[in-house]
Amino acid sequence: MTYEPRFTWNEDTLSAFRLESNYISYEELLNEVEKFVENSCHLEDGETEEDLIRDLLYQIFNYD
């Protein structure tokens, strides 16, 4: 089964994390994404922080 993105992220957010991913380790990026989701995102019905983190990481690394 192929993952399909569920959320729409601001293009500036994606660009910033994509740039950052070129200079830090995956673990450091994961930590930054976790902090971003925790501090800047608002959960809606049925969403979890893990859902947003997974989706954001997918979109950071899978783009054309």
Image (cartoon, rainbow, N blue to C red):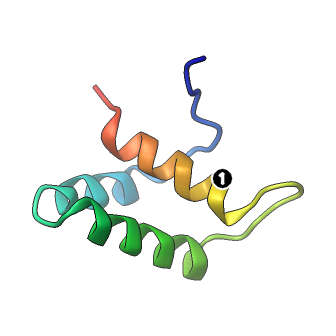
Circle 1 is placed at which residue position?
A: 51
What residue sits 25% from the left and 52% below the top? Answer: 18
Crowd around label 1: few <14 · some 14–19 · many ≥20 (10 Å): some
In percent of width and height, residue 22 lies at 12, 55
In the rendered image, which quarter is residue 49 located in? Answer: bottom right
Q: In the image, is 55 to the left or to the right of 59?
A: right
In the rendered image, which quarter is residue 48 located in? Answer: bottom right
In the rendered image, which quarter is residue 45 located in? Answer: bottom right
Q: In the image, is 11 to the left or to the right of 40?
A: left
In percent of width and height, residue 58 lies at 44, 41
Q: Is residue 63 above or below residue 47?
A: above
Q: Which residue is the extreme one toward the bottom?
A: 39
What residue sits 56% from the left and 27% below the top? Answer: 3
Q: In the image, is 31 to the left or to the right of 17?
A: right
Amino acid tagged 1: Asp
Badge count: 1
Asked whether 54 or 18 is in front, the reply is 54
In percent of width and height, residue 51 lies at 66, 53
Residue 9 is at least partly visible in this image: no
Q: Is residue 35 above or below residue 5?
A: below
Q: Is residue 61 above or below residue 13?
A: above
What residue sits 43% from the left and 67% below the top? Answer: 33
Residue 26 is at least partly visible in this image: yes
Q: Quadrant of the C terminus?
A: top left
In percent of width and height, residue 50 lies at 64, 59
